[in-house]
Image: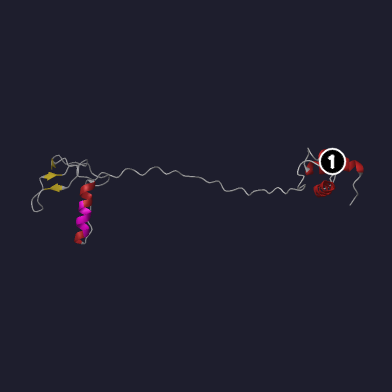
Amino acid sequence: MSRWTAEEIRELVTLWPTSTAAQIAYRLHRPRAAICGKAKRLLEEGLLEGKNAKNPNPRKRRRRARPLRIWIMLPPPPPPANDSLAMRPCSLLELDEARCHWPLGDVNEVATEFCGGAPAPGHRYCRHHMRMAHDQGSDAGHATRY
């Protein structure tokens, strides 16, 4: 290693408060570690003042980039379906795909009236009668087709 000249030491002392160790190393054509070592010795001797007086060789830790957190806001749940009985009794002639096909009256009689309420999407019965059919089917031990 080459010795430090008085001119290099003066330049180091002059540049130290305003420049980084890497910038000084580039200017003096010396390794950064040599600049930091000499600055540390000069600070200990009291010949150098300025930035980083307590630690002339601060190791800047680079933080690892944390993964970006993405918060997905789910839409609020839909309000509970109203499956209360909203019958609009109708006759067989009035019965179409837009009405519930649940027969009204006694089980042993021929149905002459039907619920007529709004059917559940893709089904023939309203939600209330679908639930009734499901409950009756599970009680009987067999599946009910709706």
Camera-nearest residue between 93 and 13? 13
Task: Left or right? Give the position of 106 relative to 118.
Answer: left
Task: Left or right? Give the position of 84 relative to 65.
Answer: left
- Say which element carries label 1: helix
Q: Quadrant of residue 120?
A: top left
Camera-nearest residue between 39 and 133? 39
Residue at the extreme front: 46
Residue drawn at 21 percent across, 55 percent down: 135
Residue at the extreme left: 109
Magenta stretch: includes residue 118: no
Amino acid on which the number 1 mark rests in the picture: Val
Q: Which residues are magenta?
A: 132-138
The picture places residue 52, in percent across and down from the top left corner, at 75, 44
Residue drawn at 20 percent across, 60 percent down: 139
Task: Left or right? Give the position of 27 relative to 97.
Answer: right
Coloring scheme of the render? secondary structure
The picture places residue 88, in percent across and down from the top left corner, at 16, 40
Residue drawn at 85 percent across, 47 percent down: 45
Residue tagged by mark 1? 13
Task: Left or right? Give the position of 14 relative to 54.
Answer: right
Residue drawn at 91 percent across, 43 percent down: 6
The picture places residue 39, in percent across and down from the top left corner, at 82, 46
